[in-house]
Image (cartoon, rainbow, N blue to C red):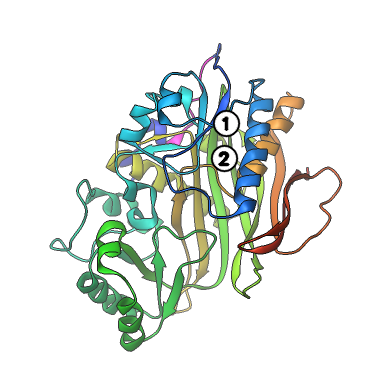
Amino acid sequence: MPSTLELRHVPTALSCSPIPLPWRTSGVASLVGHARPADNVHDRASRATLLTRIAAVLDQPLLDPMDVEQASLATALLVPGEALEARVAAAAGITDRHGLLGGVVPAPFVATKAISHGLVDDRAACPAGWSFAMSRLLGDAALPGYTAFTHTDAATAGRLLLVRGPVRIKDVCGKAGLGQRVVRSTEQLDAALALEDAADLAEHGIVLEENLTDVVTYSVGTVELGHQCVSYWGTQTLTTDHKGREVYGGTDLHVVRGGFAELAALDLPGRLSQAIRCAAIFDAAAHAAYPDILLTRRNYDVIEGTDAAGNRRIGVLEQSWRVGGASGAELSAFEAFRAEPGTTQVRCSTVEVYDLVTPPVGAVTYYQGVDPVVGAMTKYAMRYA
């Protein structure tokens, strides 16, 4: 496990750095054209509502979506749908935290699950810019596992992990819990890996990690928006989609003013303190391993579950350095803190239901309708306390 001494020299990773007043932009805009477009209606509708609320909480006008060239000529707060590669951010005129809600990374793989684990050995294939220090800095803040960029390395990694018990194979770009499967034998492992395209593996990689059961997934994060900063811990819920799959169903957040330090100072049960500690270690390790990253929205999924030996384990699953599923709850917290200057903690939630339901009184509806891809769906956010 990295020591406090080892990580203390990365202050930006352990605290918020809100932008000092006065803070002015020409408005808030979605940055488009930097990645593949959203493939469903509910994501686009949710994003439009989120941008409207961001602009309102900042007292800024909501601008039309901008491409990279338009953004380079403006002074807008840009909200991309994915973490931006550094070259794209530079072309859009993003040089510091003032103009971004999200993240900037030196290479696309740095924004994915791939960095949650190390390689199976020193000879394993990896992309240019891969940090060999990341897994060492993480220590036991992540689950036992490996990232692989070839079939051979993945097969070796899987066999090493199968000695401990079942192995979860994960698409590094998968969202909402999709793109994963559990294997319990070398035959199942080889069959699963045979489905992977070699070119995709080389470009994106694949994660193989110890599978846990009886799990709880926590969200731990911090967001900088204008001159404000909030941090939170929370729990995720699962729901069933129209294909019968267990998928992301929302997040219940407990939010405080300030950064990870304020969050860690709360009097919380041991398991929550450990989850926050793991997220802070991951955050600091990422900043140390990839010092060029620029992050104003940081969210970490942390799992607690039982391993094959019957032990309870806690570790970071992945990072999200972009607006995401919990962003509606984050905005609810910013709105509450703005309306109530004396309030220091709030509880806010996002909910996703694969049905047409009536949101509670006071909720902000992000989407309600029949998405052509996923079917009937309702998404909302609200403050509870």
Is residue 16 magenta-colored? yes
- Amino acid type at image mark 2: Leu
Mark linked to residue 263: 2
Q: Is residue 181 left or right of residue 245?
A: left
Q: Taken as a whole, is the magenta stretch helix, strand or loop?
A: loop
Q: Is residue 343 above or below residue 299?
A: above
Is residue 154 magenta-colored? no
Tell me what residue is drawn at x 23 percent, y 75 percent.
156
Query: Residue 276's x, y, as percent?
Result: 51, 48
Q: CA distance from mark 1 to mark 2?
A: 8 Å
Residue 89: which quarter of the image?
top left
Tell me what residue is drawn at x 63 percent, y 75 percent.
244
Query: Residue 62's x, y, as percent?
Result: 63, 26
- The residue segment tinted magenta is 14-20
Q: Which residue is mark 1?
A: 258
- Amino acid type at image mark 1: Gly
Tell me what residue is drawn at x 34 percent, y 52 percent.
138
Q: Is residue 4 left or right of residue 216?
A: left
Query: Residue 345's x, y, as percent?
Result: 69, 37
C-beta proximity under 8 Å, tags 1 and 2: yes
Q: Is residue 318 visible?
A: yes
